[in-house]
Image (cartoon, helix red, strand yellow):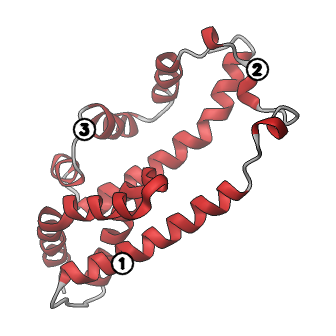
Amino acid sequence: MSKAYADKVLEEAFESFGKALEEFCRVRLGEAGQSSNDCVQEAFLVFYKRLLGGETFENPRAFLYKTANIMVLRAREEYFKNAKRSKSLEEAQDIPVFIEAFSENELDYERIKEILVTRLSEDEQKLYKMKYEQKMSLAEIGNELSIAPAAAANRLSRLRTKIKAMTKPVLQEILKGGG
């Protein structure tokens, strides 16, 4: 199967099932719902990789829902595993928490976001703006960058990981009076 064909099938599947699949994941995840977008992206990524590997699907919708359900189960497992590590409020008072060092007045989220975004490459900044400021879909981002939606999902996943890794050092820098 050619890449062009795989791209076309992926785009059609995303257009047909993307929003419904996201709603499915959000409902199934419940309190862990912040992971719904990741579950959808992972499901489409698995689908795309299988397409590139030459697999054909009689019912792509069924495959995507089954794959998304697996991603939901993994996300719920991770969420509840982390929730078990939570402490009661009384116990938490004795645990040093990094963010406690800030007063409410010092936490200027817009400034923190600005610092983080300026430390991204030009391409990463463009991707960030398309997804989080312009609220573009993966298909729209893919069209804008001339890449498949799955490639856009991969880039966004790497971008989120990078921003998460940068956050603590930036907060520490701000605390020390830098930034």
- Return the mark for residue 67: 1
Is residue 175 left or right of 10 when viewed as pictured? right
Q: Quadrant of residue 37?
A: bottom left
Q: Quadrant of residue 154?
A: bottom left
Nearest the viewer among 35 and 45 is 35
Nearest the viewer among 166 and 146 is 166
Q: Position of residue 170 (x, y in %)?
A: 63, 27
Sequence-first tag of 2 and 3: 2
Sequence-first tag of 3 and 1: 1
Determine whether the residue tagged by mark 2 lies in a helix, strand or loop.
Answer: helix
Is residue 23 left or right of 160 when viewed as pictured? left
Amino acid at pointer 3: Lys
Task: List the residue tagged with mark 2.
Answer: 101
Q: Residue at coordinates 46% horizontally, 18% vertically from top-left?
A: 110
- Disc 2 and disc 3: Cα gap in Å? 33 Å
Sequence-first tag of 1 and 2: 1
Task: List the residue tagged with mark 3.
Answer: 135
Amino acid at pointer 1: Thr
Q: Position of residue 159 (x, y in %)?
A: 45, 46
Q: Residue at coordinates 25% horizontally, 38% vertically from top-left?
A: 135
Task: Using the image, determine if residue 11 lies above or below residue 132.
Answer: below
